[in-house]
Image (spheres, rainbow, N blue to C red):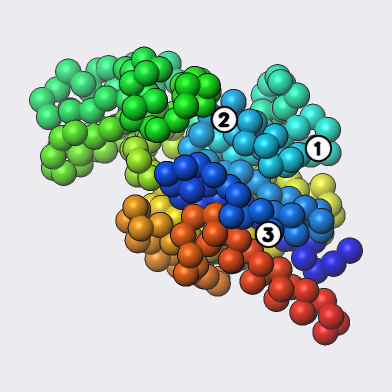
Amino acid sequence: MTLLSSLVVYTDLDGTLLDHHSYSHAAAGPALALLRAHDVPVVLASSKTFPELAEIASELALEYPIIGENGAFVAWPVAFPLSADFDRERAGYRFRYFGRSYDGILKVLRLLRRYPGMAFSGFSDWGIDELMAHTGLERAAAERAAQREASEPILWEGSADDLGVLHRALEGYGLTLVKGGRFFHVMGPTSKRDAMCWLHANIERMQGRELQMVALGDGPNDMEMLEAADIAVVVTNPDSDAIAPQARRVLQTTLAGPAGWNEAMLQIAAEYNDRGQET
């Protein structure tokens, strides 16, 4: 067992592990292979749906838990030995939900849309062709993105003042509004941070030892997750607002997207390898 195996990696996807425009993860290949060789769990933590995350996890050969819809749920493969309570089991995964139901979120949005200034549209308003146009996803990927369980991405088309009105109105209904890379996300009182901390505590219990949290992200909806981590990696994204998390240790990549992800993880791996040789 190496020092590197004391890490658990929690990563955002779009603009971080995946290229913001092409959705490719190829540039992160060397670091992913190294982590896989040392049995370091790589947990996908995204605004994406379960079908999207399961597809990406399969492509990357990751058999670890996933955090979906900005922390609305944690799902882990049945074969992953996590002894935690779960709400349902399907498609080879066990699910623990933390958010509000999708139907409940849409009901509130339909109500708020009646008021002046509430200029927005979301995934539930669009057919697959329109969803493809807004996201740049191919049809099969767009169909997976539409299978939401606990959050609604919206495009805001109104003023900054009215956006503040929407934010406060949603809070009155127990919902939150989070800025992502392309969309605002309406969801329950959940976060990537809370889901990450719940999962990390259970992984530590499973392994019977303390583990280090490495979190990687590029946008405002990653801030809380980054600030809760032992090592926070801010992946450069010229298409997103700059972020400056206050964490125990913060690394800023020079490269963008998966190339930056690869850069940071190889640096961290080299440091932990050097520490192991010293001891």
Task: Give neighbour class at mark 2: few <14, some 14-19, many 20+ (Cα, 10 Å).
Answer: many
As helix, strand or loop, the secondary structure at mark 2 comes to helix
Disc 2 residue type (three-letter): Glu
Q: Name the quadrant of the N terminus.
A: bottom right
Q: Residue at x 84, y 80 (%)?
A: 277
Residue at 44% over, 47% down: 20
Residue marked by disc 3: 31
Secondary element at tag 3? helix
Q: Is residue 53 left or right of residue 34?
A: left
Residue 274 shows up from this direction: yes
Q: Which badge, 1 or 3, is on the more N-terminal residue?
A: 3
**Which amino acid, by three-letter code, is at mark 1?**
Phe
Could you say where residue 51 lies in the image, as x and y percent from the top left? 59, 26
- Rendered residue at 28%/32% (across/down): 155
User: Label 2 near label 3: C-beta < 8 Å?
Assistant: no
Q: Disc 2 marks which residue?
A: 52
Sequence-wise, the earlier of marks 1 and 2 is 2
